[in-house]
Image (cartoon, grey):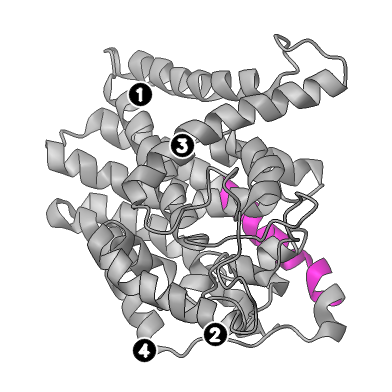
Amino acid sequence: MSGLKKIGFFSALILPVLLILGVYLGGANLFLIHCFVFILVPIMDFLISTDRENVPKEAVSRVTQEKFYKLVTFFWVYVQFGVLIWGFYIVSVSHFSWWEFLAFASGMALITGGIGITVAHELGHKSDRLEQLYSKMLLMTVSYMHFFIEHNRGHHVRVATPDDPATSRFGESFYSFWYRSVFDGYQSAWELERERLSKKGILFYSIQNQMIQFAILPLVFVSLAFGISSVLLDRIVWEVPLFFFVQSILGFSLLELVNYLEHYGMKRKKMESGVYERVTPIHSWNASHVVSNFLLFQLQRHSDHHANAHKRYQVLNHYDESPQLPAGYSAMIIVALFPPLWFAIMDPRLNEWKEKTFEKSSSPAGSY
């Protein structure tokens, strides 16, 4: 992979810079980060042709092992914690109006949820203990640590089936999906952890229960931030926990928006044996838009990720046979917030792709 492409993976650092700049410039400048993500990035995606080039097979092993790509994600962990702690300071000493507070919290969510959860997702799929630790740390900053369990042991097993809370159904609005994915996904993570502990003969109400740890750690983190801020400023800094939980909700809602558009209307066929067909690149929406893929560490090459979950982000492939989103995630997230617009754009595209892909099949849409 060229040096220019390597530099592209540092583009996520633009977001913290814009948030910090917006705060110190003040006023409407707090929306600089929002304008970049939801206006400038979609425009650049539109103007720059998609990147359908894949790493040559003979180079995959070498590129996979290059430490640069891992270090970029590690670096982000420290950047995110630094920016979030700075955010605690800002809300403690600033006199934000309600709209300024929401602008700042949502801007922080674009960092912790938009980029942070993306990095956590990448690291959480790896077997290295340090990468898994960093994944959990990032998820802690958005109060969504159960994602580490539910995504890896739940979603990747059940994707594109009715058993998966994180697979959006045909005709389902984002708002209905959000409720189901958030609450059913959380419940699923508890059940998956119960099964893991039972197999090992460990009591459910044990400190080894990761779900208990995951419920406590964000509270400990924000309590420390609240306590330190209150002592330093000699007053009860209620803004810190409020800010933390508001940006957490907005942050994991960004994740759910991405979940919504990644598998909308996808179905795996159920075989006569009662087992679903293997996950392939046709069971996820793909997007190979250059700018947003740099920003999101190629998360948009989601088709290959689900077919080969072990692959590192730098070697994920584009597949022409996968269903293709008409734009990158930044643009499609906005579209998903308006169900009539989403259905008008995506339903015909989904049906057209099914007809083209399964025209020789007796069951075009698959069956549950």
Amino acid under disc 4: Leu
- Whether tag 2 and tag 1 are in contact, CB under 8 A, the answer is no
Q: Which mark is residue 356?
A: 2
- Whether tag 4 and tag 3 are in contact, CB under 8 A, the answer is no
Task: Kindly identify which residue carries mark 4.
Answer: 47
Q: Nearer the viewer, residue 18 or 368?
A: 368
Q: Which residues are magenta?
A: 62-77
Of marks 1 and 3, which one's residue comes earlier in the chain? Answer: 3
Give the CA separation, mark 2 to mark 1: 51 Å
Which of the two discs, 2 and 3, sits closer to the camera? Answer: 2
Of marks 2 and 3, which one's residue comes earlier in the chain? Answer: 3
Task: Kindly identify which residue carries mark 3.
Answer: 182
Whether 70 is among the magenta residues is yes
Of marks 2 and 4, which one's residue comes earlier in the chain? Answer: 4
- Whether tag 1 and tag 3 are in contact, CB under 8 A, the answer is no
Give the CA separation, mark 2 to mark 3: 33 Å
Residue 182 appears at what percent x and percent y? 46, 36
Q: Which mark is residue 131?
A: none
